[in-house]
Image (spheres, rainbow, N blue to C red):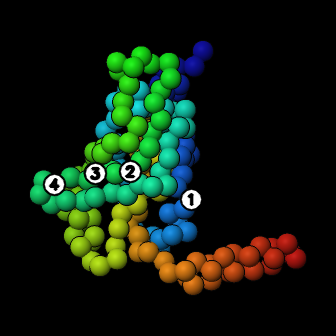
Amino acid sequence: MASKKSKLKESNEPLIQNRKARYDYLISDTLECGVKLTGTEVKSVRNGQVSLGEGYVHASLEPLSLLLHGVHIAEYPPASSAVQHEPVRNRVLLAHKREIRKWANMTRERGKTIVPLKMYFVDGRVKMLIGLGTGKKQHDKRQAIKARDAQRDMERRM
């Protein structure tokens, strides 16, 4: 019989990924944060009913916080309407004070933004990987697609 601890261990494999973020932004730095969620939100995340595509993170020095905006977590259908959460609301990201200060200062530069990259479970807790991104121009996106296609062609020929 498996121990209780081994049942709780879950893989670090991404449950939800924001693939559009790597296409739209050049990611220079990443940080793993905890996410403050309600019970029905955690169950919806476990079911994979999350959309990170429209999300972004706001880092502020006064008050010192990281807020996740624009991420849609669907309602959990089995729960009653009295305990349901709001699908799109600002959610607090949990990180150390020095990391929040560092990321808030990095976003002061023109063109820098913080985007959510992945959401996954570690020891039963929801974690989010966020990245510091600089927006790509249209021609940069086209060059990335051409390079990726050329790489695939080379691999096929080998």
User: Residue furthest toward the front?
Assistant: 81
Q: Secondary structure at mark 4?
A: loop
Q: Amino acid at mark 3?
A: Leu
Q: Quadrant of residue 58?
A: bottom left
Residue pointed to by mark 4: 64
Q: Residues within 10 Å of mark 3 (few under 14, many from 20)?
A: some
Q: Position of residue 39 (x, y in %)?
A: 37, 26
Query: What mark, if any, has residue 67 been given in the picture?
Result: 3
Q: Which residue is mark 2?
A: 70
Of all residues, the one furthest to the right in this rendering is 157
Pair 4/2: label in front: 2
- Gap in Å between the C-alphas at discs 3 and 2? 10 Å
Separation (CA) of disc 3 from disc 4:
10 Å
Residue 19 falls left or right of residue 130: right
Query: What is the three-letter code of the residue carrying label 4?
Result: Leu
Relative to 115, residue 14 above or below: above
* Mark 1 secondary-structure assignment: helix
